Image (tube, rainbow, N blue to C red):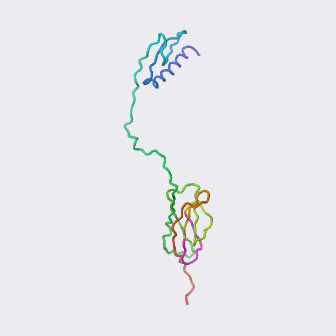
Amino acid sequence: MTFTVRFCILFILLTQAFAVYASSAKIYVWRNEQGVLVFSDSPQPGAEEVDVQTSNTIKSSINTSILDIKPKVISNSYQVDIFQPKNNATIRDNTGSVYISARIKPIFKPGLKIQLYLDNSPYEKPQTHSVFALRNIDRGEHQIKMSLLDDKGKVIAISSPVTFYMHRASVNKAN
């Protein structure tokens, strides 16, 4: 590289550095033995102090102190609520189908599973969503409840039991 190119690169780098240190340090300039202009923050014999003007600073007119930028902590106290079917509801379906839905509070995180109990017996395997479709349920009174399981299979929440009545039309005549 030629002397001029090196000098230009050095000058550009040093002028960029001025903006960073302008408000906190004094800058000195002198020529070394080879005649190259040297900028430094420490004084040398024969160096002159460079008059550095403070940079223009623009402050935001928007108040960001009211913004809530903290990550939300998800509570580990869970709640399971069955909202379908309603307690003491009568389900009229000749195929015996019942759709069951629940809400998990505060949030259904990955790794959690739901176990449905029908008449105090586990119904199929635990699953990763809170909607169940029961098929061919017998006529009469039934009770359901759900338990929320963590990734190790430990019960961390249980719903209140919900009673429903399955009504299936029959062609049998009563005597």
User: Which of the 4 image quadrants contains residue 4?
Assistant: top right
Residue most toward the bottom?
Answer: 175
Residue 51 counted in the magenta span: no
Q: Position of residue 89 (x, y in %)?
A: 49, 73
Residue 164 as seen in the image, left or right of residue 124:
left
Q: Vertical placement of 102 versus 39: above or below?
A: below
Dominant SS of magenta comes to: strand
Q: Vertical placement of 58 versus 26: above or below?
A: below
For the point 48% across and 71% down, the residue is 87
Total numbered labels placed on residues in the image:
0
Q: Quadrant of the C terminus?
A: bottom right
For the point 43% across and 46% down, the residue is 68
For the point 45% across and 22% down, the residue is 25
Q: Position of residue 139 (x, y in %)?
A: 56, 78
Residue 135 as seen in the image, left or right of residue 44:
right
Q: Position of residue 1 (x, y in %)?
A: 59, 16
Front-most of 4 and 32? 32
For the point 55% across and 55% down, the residue is 109
Front-most of 41 and 5? 41
Q: Position of residue 120 (x, y in %)?
A: 58, 71
Segment tinted magenta in the rendering: 131-143
Residue 137 counted in the magenta span: yes
Q: Vertical placement of 151 versus 171: above or below?
A: above
